[in-house]
Amino acid sequence: MGRAALIALLALPLLLSTAPRSFMAHDEGYYALQARWMVESGDWLTTGFWGQPFYDRTPGVPWLIAASTSVFGPHRWAIHLPNYACAVATAGVTWRLSRSWVSAAVLVLTPLWFSYAHLATQDMPLLALELFGLWGLWTRRPIPAGLWLGLAFLIKGWMALLPALAMTPLLLLERRPLLAQWRFWAALLVGWLPALLWLERSLARYGADVVSLLWRKLFWLSGPTVFAQGPLYYLWNVPVNTAPWGLIAPLGWLLLLIRWQRGKLQRDQLLLWLGYPVLLLLLLSGFRTKTPYYALQLTPFIAYGAAMALEWTAQQSGRLWTRLRWISVLPGAGLVTAGMAAPLPAIGTVAPLGVRVAAIALGSCWLASGWQRPGARRLWLWLVGPYLAMSCLLQVGVFIDHSPGTRLKLADPTVSAALKRGPVHFLGAWPIPDDAQKERILLALGAPQVGGMHDRAETLPIGVPVWQLQGNSWTLHPSWTQP
C-alpha cells in the first residue's frame, strides 16, 4: 500500500462519522446562512443579514461555502468541504516545512485543531493561507510569499495583519532578497485585487456608512467587550486546548535553542519555528479581544515543538527514562482507572460510552509506553492513543454535534412537515436575546426556504409557517393566522 493510500485510510475515522451533526450558530451557522443568501439571491457582493447589508466581516468564507454548495448542492458536507480542504492543506504544509511526519500527526491530533477542522469558520482557511505564505518565505518563492496576505484579508479581515507582522523578522533578516523581486510585489498586488474590488464595489453600492462597519468593528473588538481578557489569557488557554502537546512543546523548544547554540540549527529555522510563533503570541496577547480560536494559528508550531520532544524522549533509556516515563504512565493509569470505574451509561446513550472507551484506549496506550524499549514503538504508542481517542469521540458526535437541542426540534415530524410547505418566516421584536439570535440562525438553516424577519404580526402573510419569539426561544405556528 502506498504512503498516500495509507494516510487516506488512517484519516477516514478522523473525517467521517455516522453520528448526528448540527451547526454551531456563531460563527459556523452565520457563514452558512450568508452563503445561502448569496446563492439564492445571486448577489455575491453583499455580506447581508436578513435582507440587509451587514458589513461586520469580509466575505471570504461565505464565498467558499457558496461556491461549494453551488457545485455540489446544499448538503451539509458541501458546506464543510472548503474547511476540510484547508485542514488537509495545513497538515501537508506543516509536514513539508518541518520535514517531520510526527509534526503533522501531532497537529492533526491536537484538540483545538481537530475541533476547528470540523467547523466551517474563518480560522482554518486563515491558517492555511498563513502557512502558504510562510512556505513561500521559507522556500524563497516570491509568488506565495506575496499572494497570501490579500486573500487572508478576504477571509479574516484586519486580523490577517497580525501574522503578516509576525513574519516580518524572517522576511527582513533572512529573506530580504525577495523584496527586490518584481514577482513578489506583483503577487502581493494580485492577492489584494479581489479584496480591493469588493470594497470598491461595496462602497459604490452602499456608501461608507455601511461598509465602515469593517473597521468600526475592529475598534469595538479593541475595547472592553465581553471577549476582553487579560494579557496572560493564552498562557493558560493554549496549553489547555492543545493538551497534551501544548504541555510538552516547551521541551521541544528548549531542544531547539540548544541545537542553535551548538551551531546545529540555522537562524532562519529558529525564526520560523520559535521566533514567528512567539511574536504572533505577543501580538495576539496585546489585542484586547481574546478567544480560543485565535490561538489556532499557533498549533503547527506547538505540534513541531511537541514532535521534537516526543522524538527525543522516545530514544531515552536508563535512569533518565525511568524518571521520564511517569509523565505518560501516570496520566495513562488515571485515564484507564477513570474509564473502567465510570458507571455504565443507559441503553441508547452512546456519547458517554464513547467518552469512556476513548479514555480507556488513550490511557492503555500511554500506560503501555512506559515499558517499551527506546525507539519507534514507544513513539507510536504516544500517537496511537490520541488517534483512537479522537476517533471514538468523533463517532459519538463530539466535535460535530454542536446544537443537539435545535437539531431535535427541527427533526420533530410536525415541524419538518410544516417547514417543507413553503417559506418560513420569523416574528420577533428587537432586541432579540443572544441565545434566541443563535437559535434563529440554526432554525433558518434547517428550513428548505427562508422567508423574512418581521417585528410586527401585521406584516406576516396568512397561512405561512412562522417561528415566533416567546421568551428566549422560538415556537412554530404551522399556519399563521392574524391574532
Image: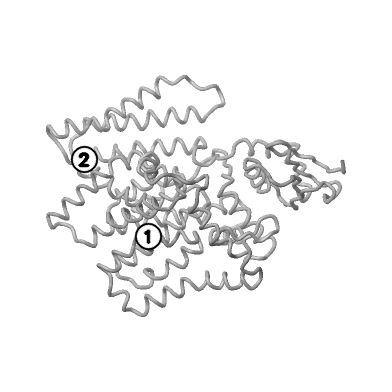
Q: Is residue 210 above or below residue 440?
A: below
Q: Position of residue 226 (x, y in %)?
A: 52, 44
Residue bearing the label numbered 2: 314
- The image shows residue 277, relative to residue 402, as above or below, that is below
Q: Secondary structure at mark 2?
A: helix
Residue located at (47% from left, 31% from top):
354
SS of the residue under disc 1: helix
Above or below, 216 against 305 in this view is below
Near-viewer residue (262 or 40): 262
Q: Position of residue 32 (x, y in %)?
A: 60, 53
Q: Is residue 309 left or right of residue 446?
A: left
How many marks the image carries: the answer is 2
Left or right side of 381 for 32: right
Label 2 to label 1: alpha-carbon separation: 28 Å
Q: Is residue 225 left or right of residue 385?
A: right
In the foreground, 94 or 226: 226
Other residues around mark 2 within 10 Å, as few (<14) / some (14–19) / many (≥20): many
The residue to which callout 1 is attached is 131
Q: Quadrant of residue 141?
A: bottom left
> Along the horizontal axis of the image, is 168 left or right of 396?
left
Q: Residue at x 75, y 48 (%)?
A: 424
Point out residue 155 in the picture as x, y percentages from the top left corner.
Answer: 50, 60
| Circle on res. 228 | none
Q: Quadrant of residue 139?
A: bottom left
2 or 1: mark nearer the eye: 1
Q: Are marks 2 and 1 in contact (CB under 8 Å)?
A: no
Mark 2: which amino acid?
A: Ala
- Mark 1 residue type: Leu
